[in-house]
Image (cartoon, rainbow, N blue to C red):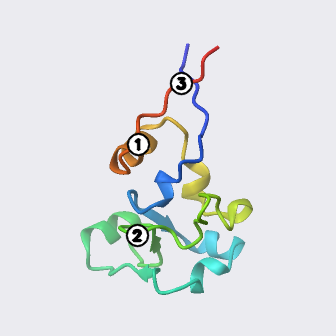
Amino acid sequence: MEKQFECDQCGACCQGHLIVEVYDIDVLREPKLENADQKYARIDPNLPLAYELDQEGNCLIIACGSACSFLKENFDCAIYPTRPNVCVAMQAGSEQCQSARQSADLDALQPVQG
């Protein structure tokens, strides 16, 4: 039986411990992503990482080394209903989740009992 996890809303995935990439489809759904503030930076298309993420350089990157500016003090997301696809895809208890928690000096997320 596969272990089940429930997000405890620690905010580690939004605090800059992971790379969060935002594409045109995300900006269409949530226009605030494009012009939110100076924490967003267009990726240099000459960098290997940019090539992996988006060969045309159309990727915005947020939450890389600093917290996402949409992360509120209580760790709620200010744009939760229209957050980027990469945020929607983040699974509680996944390797990325556990890595972000470790980087934030948090204990590993434990499976739900039952």
What separation in Å lies between label 3 and label 2 (alpha carbons)? 28 Å
Q: Position of residue 63 (x, y in %)?
A: 45, 67
Q: Position of residue 28 (x, y in %)?
A: 68, 75
Q: Quadrant of residue 113?
A: top right
Q: Which mark is residue 111?
A: 3
Say which residue appears at 53% left-offset and 48% top-offset.
10
Mark closer to the chain start, 3 or 2: 2
Bin the neighbour count of mark 1 within 10 Å (Cα to Cα): few under 14, some 14-19, many 20 and up: few
Residue beneath label 1, please? 106
User: In the displayed structure, does residue 52 sit left or right of residue 61?
Assistant: left
- Tag 1: amino acid: Leu
SS at mark 3 in the image: loop
Using the image, determine if residue 112 lies above or below residue 33: above
Q: Position of residue 79 (x, y in %)?
A: 69, 67
In the picture, the quarter occupied by the C terminus is top right
Say which residue appears at 48% left-offset and 53% top-offset.
13
Bin the neighbour count of mark 2 within 10 Å (Cα to Cα): few under 14, some 14-19, many 20 and up: some
Q: Name the mark nearer the viewer: 1 or 3.
A: 1
- Tag 2: amino acid: Ser
Bin the neighbour count of mark 3 within 10 Å (Cα to Cα): few under 14, some 14-19, many 20 and up: few
Q: Quadrant of residue 73?
A: bottom right
Say which residue appears at 46% left-offset and 67% top-offset.
67
